[in-house]
Image (spheres, rainbow, N blue to C red):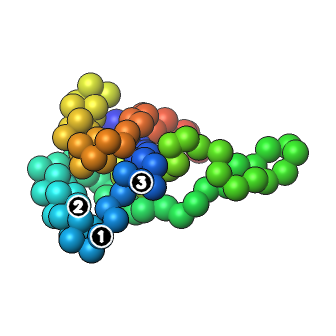
Amino acid sequence: MPRYLLIYKAETSQTPQTPEAAEEAMAAWGAWIETLGPKLVDPGNPVGKSWTVTAEGAREGGNRPPIMGYSILECDTLEEACTLTAKNPMVAGGGEVEVTPLVEMET
């Protein structure tokens, strides 16, 4: 079954700013994760500040809005992955989620 990478993106101002807001956000994430069941094959993790590496060297940042974390879903179609992602707390909080198929490579 195809797998889809969810890339969570938000400005820092869109993240919880108080312990109470963080607790509320974690509860929303937990509730969303429960709805996914076995379709969530990797809940992922938050990520730190990114660096962009080019032929000219490395520089801090580069993504707008910044990448905040990732997850991996296993769904029948891209449309199903997008439908499940539309209910994600990142979207509800004003952020965005990129959904992209993971392409299997033969070794």
**Secondary structure beneath disc 3?**
helix
Identify residue for label 3: 13
Distance between the alpha carbons at the discs numbered 1 and 2 = 10 Å
Amino acid on which disc 2 is placed: Ala
Residue at image location 23% in from the left, 43% down from the top: 92
Residue 54 is left or right of residue 70, and the answer is right
**Secondary structure beneath disc 2?**
helix
Above or below, comparing residue 2 to residue 24 in the picture: above
Amino acid on which disc 1 is placed: Thr
Above or below, comparing residue 16 to residue 79 in the picture: below
Q: Nearer the viewer, mark 3 or mark 2?
A: 3
Residue 32's x, y, as percent? Answer: 17, 52
Amino acid on which disc 3 is placed: Ser
Residue 37's x, y, as percent? Answer: 15, 52
Residue 98's x, y, as percent? Answer: 41, 37
The N terminus is located in which quarter? top left
Identify residue for label 2: 25
Distance between the alpha carbons at the discs numbered 3 and 1 = 12 Å
Identify residue for label 1: 18
The answer to whether residue 70 is seen in the rendering is: no
- Mark 3, Cα crowd under 10 Å, few <14 / some 14-19 / many 20+, is few
In contact (CB < 8 Å): disc 1 and disc 2? no
Residue 77 is left or right of residue 31, and the answer is right
